[in-house]
Image (spheres, rainbow, N blue to C red):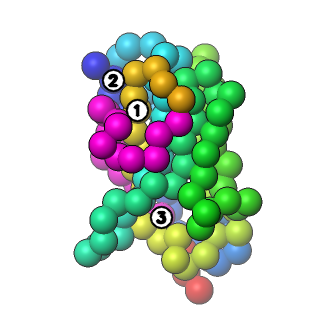
Amino acid sequence: QVQLVESGGGLVQAGGSLRLSCAASGRSFSTYSGGWFRQTPGKEREFVSAVSWSGENTYYADSVKGRFTISRDNAKNTVYLQMNSLKPEDTAVYYCAAKFLGSVFTSENEYSYWGQGTQVTVSS
């Protein structure tokens, strides 16, 4: 079992930055690939970014490519999402997810473990 806890969300003006963290406990997180998803009210959860268990492979949704960067520190059992040049349309609850081994996955159905989410609000 892996438990995930997100942090780092908050209110920021358009053009600003935030860094989300996803801290994992339980089994060694270094053997899990990680992903970030987001959801707004009335909409389905959408893929944002993913990183392989080794950190060598990353993938981004087109909507965040060039603005967001995913990374991980396996020594700290943490996956990060650096979000720059934020836009009001980035406002959502952001969730981190984990899957044992594997590379990068864009479908939420691939992930076995989820955090509780952290709110990101970008004002215009």
Q: Which mark is residue 98?
A: 1
* Cα gap from disc 3 to disc 2, whole angstroms: 24 Å
Instruction: Please state which of residues 35 and 74 is positioned toward the viewer in this rendering.
Output: 35
Circle 3: element type: strand
Could you tell me residue 63's position as x and y percent? 59, 67
Q: Is residue 76 visible?
A: no
Residue under numbered circle 3: 120
First of labels 3, 2 by sequence position: 2
Could you tell me residue 102's position as x and y percent? 48, 25
Circle 1: element type: strand
Identified at 70% across, 74% down, the residue is 15
Identified at 35% across, 37% down, the residue is 110
Residue under numbered circle 2: 2
- Magenta residues, start to end: 104-120
Vertical side of 36 occupied by 94: above or below: below
First of labels 2, 1 by sequence position: 2
- Residue 58, quarter of picture: top right
Circle 2: element type: strand
Amino acid type, callout 3: Val
Amino acid type, callout 1: Ala
Q: Quadrant location of the C terminus?
A: bottom right
Of labels 1 and 3, the one closer to you: 1
Vertical side of 87 occupied by 116: above or below: above
